[in-house]
Image (tube, helix red, strand yellow):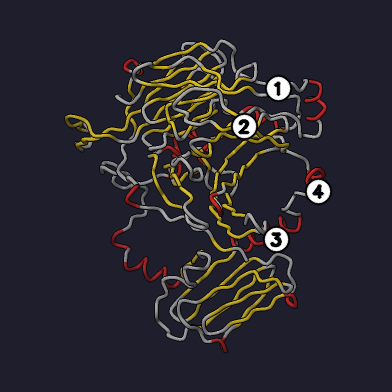
Amino acid sequence: MAETISLKLDHKLLNPNFDGYKLFSDAGVTVYTQTLREGVGRRKSYSNCYLHTRLEALHNHLFGDPFHPLSVYYFNNRGHLVKCNYSEDSRLSTGEVVWQADLSKSCEDECEASIGLSGHYQASVHFPSSDVAVVNTGQGALHVLETGDRNITHSWLLSFECNAQNGVIAHASLLRGDDDKRFLHCLLVAVTTPNNLNNNPEYVVTDEKLENTKDSALHLIHWLTITNNENITVMMNVDTALKEEVKVEVTAKELNVHISDKQILQGHFQHPVKADLVTWTLVDGKLEVILTKVSAGVTWQKIFDSSDMDEEEIPDHQMVEDVNQKLAHLTSNKWNPSPDLEKSAYNAGQLEACDEASEDLLLVRLDGASHQLSNLGHLGPTQHLFNSQVHEVSLPAFCLRHDVDGILWQPSGVDTFTHVATFNAFGYVKASKTMAKFTCSSADASYVAVADVKSHIYVFFQPEAFGGELRNRKSGKRMNTVARQLVISLKTHSEILGLHASPGVLFVLTDETLYAYCIRNL
């Protein structure tokens, strides 16, 4: 059974008193531009597959170097990998070619290949170390390049080349093994058909494993607990399982539930129960197990140990009624009876359709050696906002919506994810950007940027101290920090093809121009 993944918020990084963003003009933003002599390398897609078309439409053609945050790369129309560098001395440098890709495959070959959804993809590059780059041209070849010191611009040397699945590089890691050997692990994203998967001998996630994953997720989601002074009730959805297929085993400290000899629940109680007084019923696909506490009247903080899955608890109706009676003098049956208070009551009606998540998210870890599902976390109906490379060699962090905020989670172990930053109200902001194409944040999480398909980029900064003090005219509240919002309007209406956020400089790529916006001193 897969171990549970849980995400724990760092409440020190939350700001419940966030007052919103203050709009600042881009008049004080210095921008440097470079005209692209050969344009940006884009190949027309012949695929009629939605997923393949979407992957290409949202492809970021501008690649950042985590080891050198002020350097960016792109492929031009001739297949050259071009480097542009920003510095306070030379500002935005002219593009310098560091490597030549082979883009000799004809459009006819690409069109025929795309019928099977394994055709061309846009070229991509990733930097797993300070002296190595990995390139996938999108045409079935993977190139490992020795870059040397990337502070110095020179041609890169091809170290290794092999045939690989057509796709886009999502991540690459360089690990050191025995005898000081280095091993490269590369993750590609591609779209294919179920038939191609079944016929691929390297395909490791079989239909049976997918079904097991689905069943496990189903049972992890659908089980609840009700507790009162004497009893505990555990309920779960077992679908069409028959009574003779269900097996419930209870000891003083453990509950095990099997269906057709497959274990769907194993929980270790925080406190002992009376194993000889257990009853269970199965009605309309709902299994209900009633347990009796050894120590009646003892309040359990949780039913199961923290090492098990976090259950959803429903309080006993009588207990709820007793609490309501005791707190009746503190409550009101009127919606927001004191609207003039500084902090008004939360109104769920203020949320719009764009704020709702269409489906639940699952966080899944597959073991690289056994290809088995090792860890699973149910994140609920939330939204994934973007990914960000926080550290040079670590896995990318991912940003999820929590209430109205955006929470940045950094993988730091097999089943450990650390809350490293909060983008205030960004979950709500991102939901309103219906034309958003790219979203990224700087490595230091000082700001997050959203680029539309054309013309506009929206930048949201973390709250910063400033000289003086602001006073809210309505509430009288005084503030000495401000969170800035910046709207950047491009001089042309060209499509935005790439976006990269580095501390202090925001790079924007169109089909003819590379922009560098200096936003450090805003």
Precedes in sequence: disc 3 or disc 1: 1
Q: Tell me the crowding category of disc 3: few under 14, some 14 to 19, or many 20 or more residues within 10 angstroms, Cα based.
A: some
Which residue is label 3 attached to?
Answer: 212
* Element type where label 4 sits in the image: helix
Say which mark, if any, is on residue 198. 4
Disc with the residue nearer the chain's start (2 vs 1): 1
**Nearer the N terminus, badge 3 or badge 4?**
4
Q: Amino acid at mark 1?
A: Leu
Instruction: Assign a secondary structure to mark 3.
Output: helix
Q: Nearer the viewer, mark 3 or mark 1?
A: 1
Q: Secondary structure at mark 2?
A: strand
Query: Which quarter of the rendering shows the N terminus?
Result: bottom right
Q: Quadrant of residue 470?
A: top left
Q: Secondary structure at mark 1?
A: loop
Mark found first going from the N terminus, 1 or 4:
1
Number of residues whose C-alpha sits closer than 10 Å to that of mark 4, classed few (under 14), some (14–19) or many (20 or more): some
Q: Residue under circle 2? A: 135
User: Within 10 angstroms of label 1, few (less than 14), some, or many (20 or more) residues?
Assistant: some
Query: In the rendered image of this protein, does residue 95 appear above or below residue 21?
Result: above
Direction front: furthest residue: 179
Could you give the CA–CA distance between mark 2 and mark 1, rounded to whole angstroms? 13 Å
